[in-house]
Image: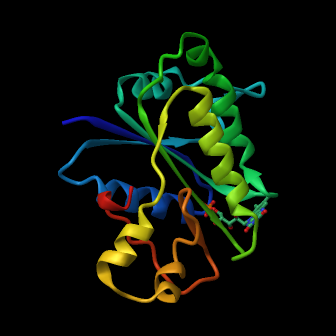
Amino acid sequence: MPLLAIVYFSISGTTETLAHAVARGADGIAHVALCRITGDDIVSGRFQNESLLNTIDRASAVAFGSPTYMGGAAAQFKAFADASSDRWTQQRWANKFAAGFTTGALAGGDQLHTLTYFSILAAQHGMLWCWIFRAGRIRAAGIGWAANLAWPHTWLAACYPKATSARPNISASDW
Ligand SMILES: Cc1cc2nc3c(=O)[nH]c(=O)nc-3n(C[C@H](O)[C@H](O)[C@H](O)COP(=O)(O)O)c2cc1C
């Protein structure tokens, strides 16, 4: 089976819950490596967890996850992304599948900016971005748009505003 690396940062556990939902979605389809970025990975301002980067080297697909902090990815995730520039120089992650997910406290908390950043990070690495395949599923199910747009509320990637009563339920067919 291919390897899916889920690379995420989370302090209070909301983004980690979403990471586990992504892992459940891959159940039976891929081996999953849950790679949580921690503060200890960052030494003198630089991300230095080579083992985590090596896991991504071996993966066929990567899901990027971070809470939205001040309208973007958390600094800890950005430190990881910056450290991936070594891989970028050799395009070592090119042609891997990529997807992303974020959480935020507010429904209008600018989470889309975080997801857009993940897609640009993937583009820089030459990865193949997987968006949320909602339009097809909504048509196939023959159910209303309003109910289906409640969560996740972007087409680019998964987004979970804490304030909503909806709960993440991601399946592999969503991406
Ligand atoms: C420094 C900081 C900045 C934040 N900025 C935003 C923001 O711009 N938009 C938003 O919706 N939520 C914002 N939040 C809320 C977090 O995104 C939210 O609580 C998130 O789910 C926490 O993730 P975690 O439980 O995985 O640590 C911010 C929280 C912190 C601590």
Residue lying at 56% horizontally and 26% vertically, measured from the top left: 125
The furthest residue to the right: 70
For the image shown, how many numbered marks are present on the structure?
Answer: 0
Residue 134 higher or lower than 146, as above or below: above
Q: Please tell me which residue is depicted at 53% across the width and 88% down the height of the picture.
A: 146
Image height check: is 118 above or below 59? below
Q: Is residue 153 left or right of residue 1?
A: right
Residue under the point 48% across and 17% down: 92
Measured along the vertical axis of the image, is residue 97 above or below residue 166? above
Location of residue 124 with respect to 29 vertically, above or below: above
Question: On the picture, is 133 further left or further right than 45?
Answer: left
Residue 141 coordinates in the image, percent (x, y):
30, 81
The image quarter in which residue 159 lies? bottom right
Using residue 88 as the reference point, say whether residue 74 is left or right of it.
right
Front residue of this view, candidates 160 and 113: 113
Residue 3 x %, y %: 29, 35
x, y percent for residue 43:
71, 26
Residue closer to the observer: 52 or 60: 60
Q: Quadrant of ligand 1?
A: bottom right
User: Residue 95 appears in which quarter of the rendering?
Assistant: top left
Q: How is the image coloured?
A: rainbow
| Quarter of the figure with residue 78 | top right
Tell me the quadrant of the picture where the N terminus can be found. Answer: top left
